Amino acid sequence: TTAKSVSSSRCTRWAGCVLESKKILLVATGTTKAKAISEMLSRNGSSPASELLDHPELTIMIDSDAAALLGEEQRAEFS
């Protein structure tokens, strides 16, 4: 199975398993990920991925395109 063939909804079904991981590395690139990153970081409940933010060993790496919808303060966290 390639990353492109797995839908984003399928990934959220595995959130419980992911949260049991010792460390999580989330990498998002491109403008197609900007909305998902913005929703996740807003913690408004619209993104199941927001649960990842509570993991003590979460590392998030995003490029400037994926950060396009973030406010200045949020973008500064990823500089």
Image (tube, grey):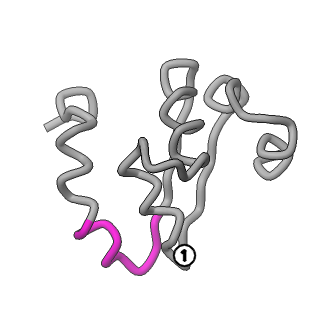
Residue 20 relative to residue 51: left or right: left
In the displayed structure, 27 sits above or below 56; it is above
- Is residue 72 in the magenta section? no
Residue 13 relative to residue 67: left or right: left
Position in image of residue 44 (x %, y %)? 52, 48
In the displayed structure, 32 sits above or below 74; it is above
Residue 22 relative to residue 3: left or right: right
Residue 78 relative to residue 12: left or right: right
Q: Residue at x 44, y 50 (%)?
A: 45
**Of 66 and 38, the residue lying toward us:** 38
For label 1, the residue is 57
Position in image of residue 71 (x %, y %)? 79, 35
Q: Which of the 4 quarters of the picture holds residue 70? A: top right
Mark 1 is surrounded, within 10 Å at the Cα level, by few (under 14), some (14 to 19) or many (20 or more) other residues, namely some
Q: Residue at x 56, y 30 (%)?
A: 29
Q: Residue at x 53, y 27 (%)?
A: 35
Which segment is the magenta one? 16-24
Q: Amino acid at mark 1?
A: Glu
